[in-house]
Image (cartoon, helix red, strand yellow):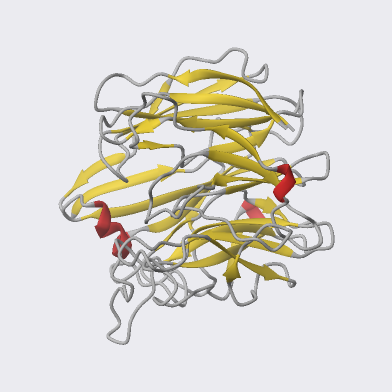
Amino acid sequence: MRVKSREVFIRSPGPGKLAWGTAYYTRARGVDMKRTRMIQTRSDITDSCDIGFSTDNGRTWSDWKTVEIVTKTPEGMHRRIPAPGFIDLATDRLVTMILEGTLPKDDPLEGMKHYYLSYEVSDDGGKTSAVSGRVMQKGHTPEHPFECVWVGKNCIMKGSRPYFRSRAFGHMVFPMQITPLGPDGEYYNPGGGYTWTEAVVLIGKWTDGMKIDWEISERVAIGPDKSTRGLIEPTVAEMADGRMLMVMRASNDAKPELPACKWCAVSVDGGRNWSKPEEWTYDDGTQFFSPSSISQFVMHSNGHCYWLGNITPTKPRGNSPRYPLVIGRVDPVSLKLIRKSMTVVDDLQPGEDPSLQLSNFYARENRETGEIELHLSRFFTQEWFGDALLVRIEP
């Protein structure tokens, strides 16, 4: 593997503004695409969202169109953050998952009690929505969308990509996370960290009228003796034998003596039930260090499963450092990371501010070239600035 090229995909508007950018396919075949530009001026809060379309695999794009994602209400600021769309190849339908919530004081931590999920389905390549609705189990209500979630007390949020249709089981798979309730029926944070979450998988099945029936998996969790923030932002991949591998971030931010690694679990029933989480290692059994940062699988048409994430040479503390960013292959038998395959995608360069974060990225395969295209913002937190890049990786 090698990094073939990198270019600015979306330029930051200026100091104090961080640009995020993604692009993804919108039809089961062909090269129609949709791109998204988001701007942030503070942590975990998105200020604006614009979209554009391409019919030539991203060579040219339509003009930007603004999507309203922030609404001031008497109850607080309502925020709506769409994720990159998932195209169900079997139906040629584009599914967009949306994180929503009304934050009384517009504090991102309020999302731990108020965020929920909605979804949209498009049958015209993302131009319009044929169906939209709340993500909730059958028989539940918007206020109580799942048996373990009560909006206003705890929440359900997006995990990491990919979303996919299971080849072995036929249903759609969406990795997510929830904040749990404690014995008093309120949001529970036993680790003493910034937040506390547990990983879940949502299982989606089509019903009449392009709506989706939703199920929720058992929760995947560890205790405060292993992480100060629980398990965060799961990414899931399905192997050729039908097993699903989940990899999650944790944290040692408030207790640096705790592990600084990624955690993994395995499902053999399509994501409904999971093995006890354990530390994810290289295929030769050796451990590696990883900060509390997102990671992502990419299932490639060449048959390999790739993993992108941060691996550090020394033990990190909490979120830092979030560099270098690496890519490697997953062994389809052991489900471990193949050590000899590891390649550095990006790293802190001489003279750069060590507040650099190479995280919160999105990756996909280019249908024409087979390259892995990585949407990555080189985010300097001290300056609160970063352009959104497009990095091409030859697998």
* Residue at 69% in and 54% down: 337
Give residue 175's quadrant in the image.
bottom right
Determine whether, in the image, residue 17 is placed left or right of residue 377: left
* Residue at 55% in and 46% down: 309
* Residue at 69% in and 63% down: 285
Count of all numbered marks drawn on residues in the image: 0
Q: Can residue 206 be seen here? A: no
Residue 295 point in image, percent of width and height: 55, 49
Which residue is at the front of the view, 120 or 23?
A: 23
Residue 259 point in image, percent of width and height: 46, 66
Which residue is at the front of the view, 102 or 325?
A: 325
Quadrant assignment for the N terminus: top right
Residue 174 point in image, percent of width and height: 59, 57
Which residue is at the front of the view, 198 or 133?
A: 198
Instruction: Give the answer, above or below, for where 310 lies relative to 173.
Output: above
Residue 118 point in image, percent of width and height: 46, 53
Determine whether, in the image, residue 186 is placed left or right of residue 99: left
Instruction: Give the answer, above or below, for where 7 lies relative to 317.
Output: above
Determine whether, in the image, residue 21 is placed left or right of residue 247: left
Instruction: Give the answer, above or below, for where 142 lies relative to 305.
Output: below
Q: Can residue 268 be seen here? A: yes
